[in-house]
Amino acid sequence: MAGQRSKLQEDIHFRILRLLQENPEWSQRELASAVGISDGSAHYVLKALVAKGLVKFGNFTSSQDKRRYAYVMTPKGIAERAAITRRFLARKMEEYEALKSEIDTLRDELGSDAEFARRPRK
């Protein structure tokens, strides 16, 4: 179970780092909504990314509210995002291959009904 949890954590880190690279001005609430996690979880993840040196806070200078921050990825964060991306892609490819194999097996079991299974439903 711990392995599954660490994969889920890494997926969340991957998604947040990806979003931050594209939208450094997003708030924790916007990040949480985009990733599908609670605001508290987003805060916890961002705090962990800052502690690891992957992200740093910068003032969002064009904002009227000077309390707003931009989350800037550090060079270490950019490198880690690339490594996480490779692992994420490898996991998703394994899942795809396993699912494709299961679909092929089920189609073989259906035999002549396999053509029906291939047609999209309306």
Image (spheres, rainbow, N blue to C red):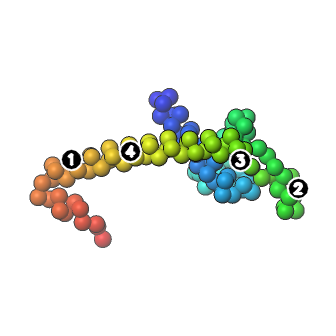
Contact check, label 3 and label 4, Cβ < 8 Å: no
Number of marks present in the image shown = 4
Dot 3 crowding, Cα within 10 Å, few <14, some 14–19, many 20+: many
Amino acid beneath label 3:
Met
In the rendered structure, find residue 66 and report the number of the disc placed on it: 2
Helix, strand or loop at mark 4: helix
Instruction: Locate residue 58 relative to residue 122 in the image: left or right.
Output: right
Amino acid beneath label 4:
Glu
Q: Is residue 41 visible?
A: no
Q: Give the spatial CA distance, label 2 vs label 3.
A: 20 Å
Instruction: Locate residue 77 relative to residue 84 in the image: left or right.
Output: right
Q: Identify the residue under disc 3.
A: 73
Between disc 2 and disc 4, whose residue precedes? Answer: 2
Residue 2 picture location, percent across and down: 50, 28
Which one is nearer the viewer's eye here, 32 or 58?
A: 58
Q: Identify the residue under disc 1.
A: 105
Amino acid beneath label 2:
Lys
Which one is nearer the viewer's eye here, 86 or 33?
A: 86
